[in-house]
Structures are given as structure tokens and as C-alpha cells.
Image (cartoon, helix red, strand yellow):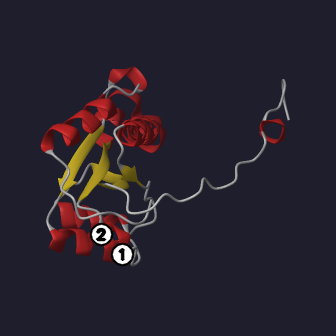
């Protein structure tokens, strides 16, 4: 979804969407996700610029920046926790949030193309907190068609490649 109506997202709805995120599975139940809610237009403009000009981030009334607390995962799992598990865990949280928002009639988009250091600066992230995804959220101004998907037979292997 890249076109949003200007309607505000009620705090109760936003909370329900983020609650879905914190119910995602995580390695060792570390729960390394951190969510930064950005409603201010000026900060959404900064995020859009940091996302290589993806202007629809400004159009959405809310952007949730989903971050991974790298230290939280690495304290238990070392390098693998820092480089993989915290990313997997936050990705699961993002998916839960996208599905919940969709079920509530909201439009979203998983934004992963951005200058990570710049986004961290904009949101004031501590050194060990890494922005992983941004989720623009709002009522959809359009109903785009589902992009084509590879057939299941093309992506499933039995036993080994």
C-alpha cells in the first residue's frame, strides 16, 4: 500500500497492532523488538528522505519504525544472536503487525530500503538498537492488486536441492 487517506489512526488501534507484534516468536524468548511510533509530519518527511525518497511514508498518518535490540539477543546467543536472531525475531513481529493491521482495514507496506544510520539518528536510537523495517500505516486510498507469486511447486523441494 502506497496511498493513504489522511485519517488519524486511533491510539487503541495502534496499540492492538503493536500487541500483535509482541506476540511473535523469538529466539530464547528474548523479544528484542522495539517500536518507535512517528506521527509528526516533519519526522515522517525525514524518514521518507532516509528511505531514498519513498514519499508515501509522509502520506501515511503513522509510521512505526521496528527496531532490533541487538544487545538483548547477543547477550544470550553471541554473534548469531546479533547478526541473525534479532533480525528474524523483529521480522516475525513485523509480519504479525502487518496481518493485524490488514484485518482491521488498514493499509501498510514493509519498508526495508533505507539508510539505517540516518533512521537511527532520526528516531534517537541507542547504539545497540538497529532499525530493521518501517511500517507506514493508515486507511488505504486505493486497493492495489496482489503482485504475482511464484507457484508452490516452484519453491518447494523435497529432501534436498
Q: Please, is residue 58 above or below residue 150 in the view?
A: below
Residue at x 84% of width, y 25% of height: 158
Question: Tag count in the figure?
Answer: 2
- Image check: 33 left or right of 86? left
- Image check: 153 left or right of 14? right
- The quadrant of the picture occupied by the N terminus is bottom left
Q: Which residue is mark 1?
A: 55
Regarding residue 126, the answer to whether it shows in the image is: no
| Residue furthest to the top | 28
Residue at x 47% of width, y 38% of height: 88
Quadrant in the picture for residue 156: top right
| Rendering coords of residue 10 (x, y %) | 16, 46
Regarding residue 34, the answer to whether it shows in the image is: yes
Give the camera-side residue of 21 and 142: 142
Asked if disc 2 and disc 1 are in contact, CB closer than 8 Å, the reply is: yes
- Dot 1 lies on which element? loop
Crowdedness near tag 2: few (<14), some (14–19) or many (≥20) residues, C-alpha within 10 Å: many
- Dot 2 lies on which element? helix
Residue at x 41% of width, y 25% of height: 25
Q: Which residue is mark 2?
A: 59
Q: Please, is residue 15 above or below residue 123 in the view?
A: above
- The quadrant of the picture occupied by the C terminus is top right
Mark 2 or mark 1, which is nearer to you? 2
Alpha carbon distance from label 2 to label 1? 7 Å
| Rendering coords of residue 98 (x, y %) | 40, 43
| Rendering coords of residue 68 (x, y %) | 33, 44
Residue at x 36% of width, y 44% of height: 105
Crowdedness near tag 1: few (<14), some (14–19) or many (≥20) residues, C-alpha within 10 Å: some
Amino acid at each position: 500500500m502506497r496511498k493513504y487517506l489522511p485519517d488519524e489512526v486511533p491510539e487503541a488501534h495502534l496499540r492492538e497492532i503493536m500487541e500483535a507484534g509482541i506476540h511473535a516468536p523469538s529466539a530464547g524468548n528474548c523479544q528484542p523488538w522495539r517500536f518507535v511510533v512517528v506521527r509528526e509530519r516533519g519526522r515522517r518527511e525525514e524518514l521518507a528522505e532516509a528511505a531514498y525518497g519513498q514519499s508515501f511514508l509522509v502520506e501515511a498518518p503513522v509510521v512505526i519504525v521496528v527496531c532490533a535490540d541487538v544487545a538483548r539477543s547477543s547477550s544470550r546467543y553471541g554473534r548469531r544472536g546479533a547478526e541473525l536472531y534479532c533480525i528474524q525475531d523483529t521480522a516475525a513481529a513485523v509480519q504479525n503487525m502487518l496481518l493485524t493491521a490488514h484485518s482491521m482495514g488498514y493499509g501498510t507496506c514493509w519498508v526495508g530500503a533505507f539508510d539505517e544510520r540516518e533512521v537511527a539518528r532520526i528516531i534517537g536510537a541507542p547504539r545497540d538498537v538497529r532499525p530493521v523495517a518501517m511500517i507506514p500505516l493508515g486507511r488505504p486510498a486505493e486497493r492495489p492488486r496482489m503482485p504475482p507469486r511464484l507457484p508452490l511447486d516452484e519453491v518447494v523441494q523435497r529432501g534436498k536441492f
